[in-house]
Amino acid sequence: MIFLIGAVSLVLPRLIIILLWLFSGWFNGVFQTWYWPLLGFLCMPHTMLWYSAVQHWWDGQWDFPQILVLILAIMMDAGSGFFGSKK
Protein backbone atom coordinates (compact mmCIF):
# COMPACT_ATOMS: atom_id res chain seq x y z
CA MET A 1 0.00 0.00 0.00
CA ILE A 2 2.80 2.42 0.84
CA PHE A 3 4.48 1.63 -2.49
CA LEU A 4 1.22 2.46 -4.30
CA ILE A 5 0.92 5.82 -2.53
CA GLY A 6 4.55 6.61 -3.36
CA ALA A 7 4.11 5.62 -7.00
CA VAL A 8 0.98 7.76 -7.40
CA SER A 9 2.65 10.78 -5.79
CA LEU A 10 5.57 10.49 -8.21
CA VAL A 11 3.38 10.05 -11.29
CA LEU A 12 0.59 12.55 -10.60
CA PRO A 13 2.47 15.83 -11.23
CA ARG A 14 3.98 14.36 -14.38
CA LEU A 15 0.52 13.30 -15.54
CA ILE A 16 -0.76 16.83 -14.95
CA ILE A 17 2.17 18.23 -16.99
CA ILE A 18 1.41 15.85 -19.85
CA LEU A 19 -2.30 16.72 -19.82
CA LEU A 20 -1.59 20.46 -19.74
CA TRP A 21 0.89 20.12 -22.57
CA LEU A 22 -1.46 18.04 -24.73
CA PHE A 23 -4.77 19.81 -24.15
CA SER A 24 -3.87 23.45 -23.49
CA GLY A 25 -1.34 26.11 -24.30
CA TRP A 26 -0.25 26.37 -20.66
CA PHE A 27 3.49 26.10 -21.35
CA ASN A 28 3.57 28.28 -24.48
CA GLY A 29 5.99 31.14 -23.94
CA VAL A 30 6.95 30.09 -20.39
CA PHE A 31 10.27 28.50 -21.30
CA GLN A 32 12.67 29.80 -23.92
CA THR A 33 14.37 26.45 -24.62
CA TRP A 34 13.28 22.82 -24.73
CA TYR A 35 15.66 21.44 -22.11
CA TRP A 36 14.29 23.30 -19.06
CA PRO A 37 10.82 21.77 -19.41
CA LEU A 38 12.38 18.36 -19.99
CA LEU A 39 14.55 18.65 -16.87
CA GLY A 40 11.57 19.95 -14.92
CA PHE A 41 9.44 17.03 -16.05
CA LEU A 42 12.09 14.46 -15.18
CA CYS A 43 13.57 15.89 -11.97
CA MET A 44 11.35 18.58 -10.42
CA PRO A 45 7.73 18.39 -11.64
CA HIS A 46 6.16 20.25 -8.67
CA THR A 47 8.63 23.11 -9.10
CA MET A 48 8.00 23.23 -12.85
CA LEU A 49 4.24 23.41 -12.35
CA TRP A 50 4.59 26.17 -9.75
CA TYR A 51 7.01 28.16 -11.91
CA SER A 52 4.60 28.03 -14.83
CA ALA A 53 1.69 29.00 -12.54
CA VAL A 54 3.57 32.08 -11.33
CA GLN A 55 4.36 33.01 -14.94
CA HIS A 56 0.66 32.79 -15.88
CA TRP A 57 -1.20 34.01 -12.81
CA TRP A 58 1.20 36.67 -11.50
CA ASP A 59 2.96 37.59 -14.77
CA GLY A 60 6.27 36.32 -13.41
CA GLN A 61 6.16 38.55 -10.31
CA TRP A 62 7.97 36.74 -7.48
CA ASP A 63 6.80 38.07 -4.11
CA PHE A 64 7.03 36.42 -0.69
CA PRO A 65 4.04 34.03 -1.08
CA GLN A 66 5.24 32.81 -4.47
CA ILE A 67 8.76 32.25 -3.15
CA LEU A 68 7.41 30.42 -0.10
CA VAL A 69 5.40 28.02 -2.26
CA LEU A 70 8.45 27.62 -4.53
CA ILE A 71 10.50 26.49 -1.53
CA LEU A 72 7.74 24.02 -0.59
CA ALA A 73 7.65 22.70 -4.17
CA ILE A 74 11.42 22.20 -4.16
CA MET A 75 11.16 20.37 -0.85
CA MET A 76 8.41 18.13 -2.23
CA ASP A 77 10.49 17.33 -5.30
CA ALA A 78 13.60 16.67 -3.25
CA GLY A 79 11.70 14.44 -0.83
CA SER A 80 9.85 12.39 -3.41
CA GLY A 81 12.57 11.83 -5.96
CA PHE A 82 16.31 11.56 -6.04
CA PHE A 83 16.93 12.78 -2.49
CA GLY A 84 14.30 10.73 -0.62
CA SER A 85 15.10 9.10 2.68
CA LYS A 86 16.46 5.57 2.64
CA LYS A 87 15.31 3.13 5.32
Image (tube, rainbow, N blue to C red):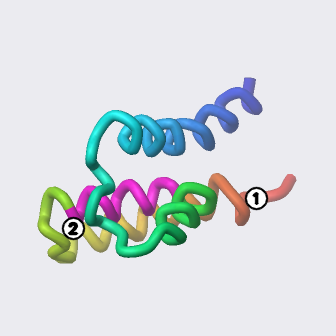
The amino acid on which the numbered mark 1 sits, given as a three-letter code, is: Ser
Q: Secondary structure at mark 1?
A: loop
Q: Which mark is residue 52?
A: none
Q: Which residue is mark 2?
A: 65
53 relative to 35, above or below: above
Q: Which residues are magenta?
A: 45-55
10 Å crowding of disc 1: few (<14), some (14-19), many (20+): few
Left/right of residue 76 with respect to residue 57 in the rendered view = right
Residue at 26% of width from left, 56% of height from top? Answer: 53
- Across and down, in percent, residue 45 comes to 51, 55
User: In which quadrant is the N terminus drawn?
Assistant: top right
Residue in the foreground of this view, choosing between 7 and 40: 40
Q: CA distance from mark 1 to mark 2?
A: 28 Å
Residue 63 versus residue 42 in the image, above or below: below
Q: Is residue 23 magenta?
A: no
Percent position (x, y) of residue 34? 48, 67
State the residue position of label 1.
Answer: 85
Residue 7 on image: x %, y %: 68, 35
Residue 24 occupies which quadrant of the picture? top left
- Secondary structure under tag 2 reads helix
Of the numbered discs 1 and 2, the one sitting upstream in the chain is 2
Left/right of residue 59 with respect to residue 16 in the rendered view: left
